[in-house]
Image: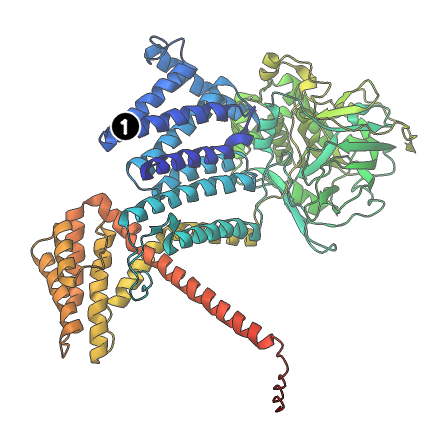
Amino acid sequence: MSGRGRLALCAYAATVMAACSMLPLVDPASWILQAAFLLAILSGVGALARRVPLARPLTVLAQAVVALLMVTLVFARQQAIGGLLPGPEAFQQLNSLLQQGTSDVGQYAIPAPATPGIRLMMVGGVLIIGLAVDALAVTFRSAAPAGLPLLALYSVAAGLSGGGASWLWFVLAAAGYLLLLLAEGRDRLSQWGRVFGGAARAPGRPQQSVFENNAPLAPVRTGRRIGALALGIALVIPAMLPALDSGLLGGAGGGGGGDGAGGTISAVNPLVSLQNSLNQPEDREVMRYNTNAPDTKEMYLRIVALDEFDGASWKSSERHIKDVPDPLPKPDGLSTAVATTEVQTSISAAGWYAQSWLPMPFPATQVKIKGDWRFEPVGRTLVGDRKQTTRGAQYTVSSLLVRPTAAQLADAPRPSADLLTEYTRVPDSLPSVVSATARQVTSGAANNYEKAVKLQDWFSTSGGFTYNTHVQSGSGTEAIAGFLKEKEGFCVHFSFSMAAMARTLGIPARVAVGFTPGAARPDGTMSVGLRDAHAWPELYFEGVGWTRFEPTPTRGSVPDYTRRQAPAGSPSSPAEPSKRASAQPSAAPSATDSCPPGARRLGDCGPSAAAGVAGPTDSGPSASALVGTALGVAALLVLPLLPLLWRRRVRARRLGSGGRTPADAVARTLAAWQEITDTAWDYGIAPDDSQTPRKAAARVVRLGRLDGPAAESVHRAAGAVEQVLYAPEPRPTPGLADDVTRVAAGLQASAGRWPSLRAILAPRSAVRVIWSLSRRWERARAGVAVRTQALAERLRPRRGKETPPEPASGT
């Protein structure tokens, strides 16, 4: 196979290997086979066009036309002219599929179903990247810039997966790129026929080819070693940097920290994860539980409370955590006069559900669970420590069903000043319409309890709001004002808005994230699906504590104490624990998933298709994480500039003043000639060490199309080299640094824009670094071998002296 054929094959393989990083995004992954087949045809068209040969732009154009025909044949055959040629109807169909794919990407969480629109985006994207890689690496013979489209392909996959892309996909993408670079290097070096600037050959031994007996010599071998080393560094350094956990759905995150006696935790805004979860095509089971609660409608499984509103989003404040006490402390603000019932709940989390916050009924009084878990007292939550997650966890929770009466809530005394200050704080950027609407809705209310009920009823029934998961995301102050105007959103909008409005009325408020009770199964257990997750506001009433309200229409259940004829409840007494064993959850859709897919996507499935998120992870990067990320980004920016920086450093050293002795003058002259040779090499004129300086100068002038002062400078430098090498008394030639500058300017003027840019950013003479490393490695290895042999000789046991034989006796 020719060198260009090998390069084309490596470009194809590199693109497919990078495309594999997108496999986790779509299920099923059969699209990759289709994309690989079409990409193979595209690469074959490029090979044929180059063999004709066509001009480079025409080759790329031919591949683009073939790619368009293939996409039309696969995705718009019925609308195409003759089933192949794209016409107006075919373009309209492709545009419609792209719009559908864009909508599907925003609607479904990962892994998304392979809808026609998503399939077109995946296959079309791979073809576009493959065309770019083939054009750069093969048609224009420049493999290094081909890494940019490959990086873009991997970055899309890593970005959509929330940074959770497996290291395997990075290794595949990086290995494909290194394979492409090595193929180009082998092709280029094989064309040179000999190594310039390599180690000196033994006397009488001819100069070897770069590939002698099909075995690569030092530059190629060292290139492989450096490539492997670079890949290893790229894998090790990210592992050493602090992790940046993000997201609220199913992702394991480092929530806790410390040595078991302290630490802090925080959580992120759940808006995006909530919306993605609500649009899931399947209601995958998250957990299963059984309980002895007399009524499961109050069995909300709470994960975390978002108690800080900074104007951009609701989030959890940074809190101190400690070891889990047994039992847990008494709930804040709860009076013994309020009726409570103690219940026991046994919970089993699914094996795929892995996040760092533990879903529990609120308020929990005791938790029995194995693993590294910590307790956050203010929010009464448990968070995993040392990468502990809920994956497959089985635990038992004792909790209280708090049943206040309307009178107890209405007569609640004023909370403490500190609590009011912290939980009624709103940002200055909150539009005045929010507080004005809150006062208008609660007009006539006699106390905070009546205000809270009026707000809940206005959102859920009388305000004309519509539940819709496809509205534009947003949780800041402007988003709340927009929601109050449009009156359309999902549970995050309802809970965030009611909590913000309650704070403007002086009622302490926060937002809880967790799961609604789920649906009963035939075996008596309760199944909680992904879309059973929810967000709701919690308002504080002294004597009752943090109290749940439900403003979201068609989701959850309205608490009894918010109804006019609320029952007084019964005295506090523990209930008998259930005898049923906790069932093991499955990955199949939960029992609530009986709604047709079409109706589910329109949000017409009623309460059984409740909103869903999973629990929050770490709130965001720490200072060390930001520093580590900044250093990583700086390294990524600096690495491509290393050849440029190396050439500038070498040029400055060669053209420096140096000493004043005759030996220094000789060194300066030879360094200036070396710089002229390397500069010409950077512009595509490979050095030829077999020629005399005079012939080499004529070759540089001819191939570099130099004339005038630049050509004179080359010849003058060559004459200076001959003078210092062969004259009986070498005399230095002044002005060689200026000659080097004139030669570089002349080569740049005759080369054009792109070759000049290549010579500056990716100088060919930078390969001398590889040769230098190869020589050092060989010398170091030879030195180690010599020292090892000497040590072995020294440690080898010496034989005893042999006794000389006695002379033979005479006869």
Judge left or right: residue 401 versus residue 596: right
Residue 424 falls in image quadrant: top right
Instruction: Inspect the image, locate mark 1, and give the three-letter code of the amino acid beneath it.
Output: Ala
Q: Is residue 630 visible?
A: no
| Number of numbered discs | 1
Closer to the camera in the image, 665 or 583: 665
- Residue 466 in the image: above or below residue 299: above
* Nearer to the camera, 468 or 208: 208
* Coordinates of residue 313 in the picture (x, y in percent): 56, 37
Which secondary structure, mark 1?
helix
Q: Which residue is at the front of the view, 451 or 763? A: 763
Residue 805 appears left or right of 7? right
Residue 172, percent from left and from top = 50, 39
- Inspect this view and state whether residue 22 appears: yes
Q: Quadrant of the C terminus?
A: bottom right
Identify the image quadrant of the N terminus: top left
The x and y percentages for residue 564 are 78, 20
Q: Nearer the viewer, residue 514 or 340?
A: 514
Query: Which residue in the structure is indicated by mark 1?
Result: 49
Residue 302 drawn at (x, y percent): 73, 34
Tell me: residue 303, above or below residue 524: below
With 206 as the anchor, is 449 left or right in this view? right
Residue at 64%, 21% (x, y): give it: 282
Residue at 23% across, 78% down: 663
At 69% across and 38% down in the image, what residue appears? 304
Which residue sits furthest left?
708
Q: Does residue 121 sit above or below 365 in this rendering?
A: above
| Residue drawn at the location 66% of the way across and 17% of the way down | 461
Q: Badge 1 local density, few (<14 within 10 Å), some, or many (20+)? A: some
Q: Is residue 134 left or right of residue 412?
A: left
Say above or below: 534 vs 81. below
Q: Which residue is situated farthest in the front direction here?
A: 811
